[in-house]
Amino acid sequence: MVQNSSLADAIPPSPTVPLLGQPLTRAFFDRSVHEVAPDIIGTTLLFNGVGGVIVEVEAYHHTDPAAHSFRGPTPRNQIMFGPPGFSYVYRSYGIHWCMNLVCEKEGTASAVLIRALQPTHGLAAMRRRRKLKDERSLCSGPGKLCEALGITIKHGGLPLDEPPFTLYPRSGKVDVIVGIRIGITKAVDLPWRYGLKGSKFVSKPFPPEPSPKG
């Protein structure tokens, strides 16, 4: 986990934020979901050129009762059992689309849920789709960000390193904060939620970190 971040304040919510480095490839996701999840914080996700900095995610492992893959493959979750580096999109509560990034080797069925973005590209399109102006509310939740970016079930199963998706590496070091996942009823105590410390764009604030003793 990397330290020393000012990224939350350094990157303004502007459509002119420069993107540095070569886009991430599918190989980035070919490792433990518990490595990918904190490492994805601070990267930039674009869908047809619209998106922003990933500031909050949750990890789901196939041994985890809260994971869709826990009981084995189904028509709904079969993408999770495929190779890493693909999108897994599902409907939440029959209302919202949610996007996950498939990780680990084929057959493992683990994924990272993208919970929140800091909008940086295509704000006009996001505001039109979400019918609001407040930048903090555009992508502050998994369903909100999919609506803002225009991601639906038809985009599930697409490679993350080919259009319409592009993922750019971090532009600097980040400070990742950890907490328990939210909005679930199983395995609620697992500290598998990761966020960009100090970000105002997360879906829900992380609890304060304990003060050092002594």
Image (cartoon, grey):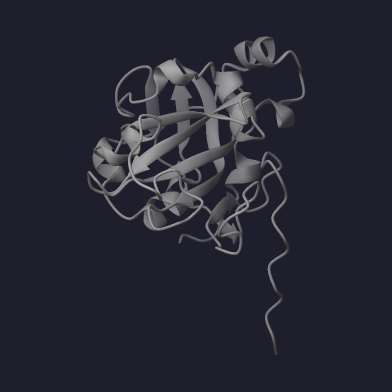
The structure residue drawn at horizontal position 56% and vertical position 54%, both measured from the top left corner, is 193
Residue 115, by quadrant, is top right
Q: Is residue 146 left or right of residue 130?
A: left
The structure residue drawn at horizontal position 70% and vertical position 73%, both measured from the top left corner, is 210
Judge by depth and name the residue closer to the eye, 139 or 199. 139
Q: Quick check: 44 above or below 51? A: below
Q: x%, y% of residue 50? A: 51, 19
Residue 15 shows up from this direction: no
- Most extreme residue toward the bottom, as rendered? 214
Residue 187, by quadrant, is bottom right
Q: x%, y% of residue 35? A: 38, 56
Q: x%, y% of residue 54? A: 53, 38
Judge by depth and name the residue closer to the eye, 212 or 172. 212
Q: Quick check: 59 above or below 179? A: above
Q: Quick check: 176 above or below 11? A: below
Q: Quick check: 158 above or below 67? A: above
The structure residue drawn at horizontal position 22% and vertical position 44%, both measured from the top left corner, is 106
Judge by depth and name the residue closer to the eye, 55 or 77. 77
Residue 85 shows up from this direction: yes
Q: x%, y% of residue 204? A: 71, 46
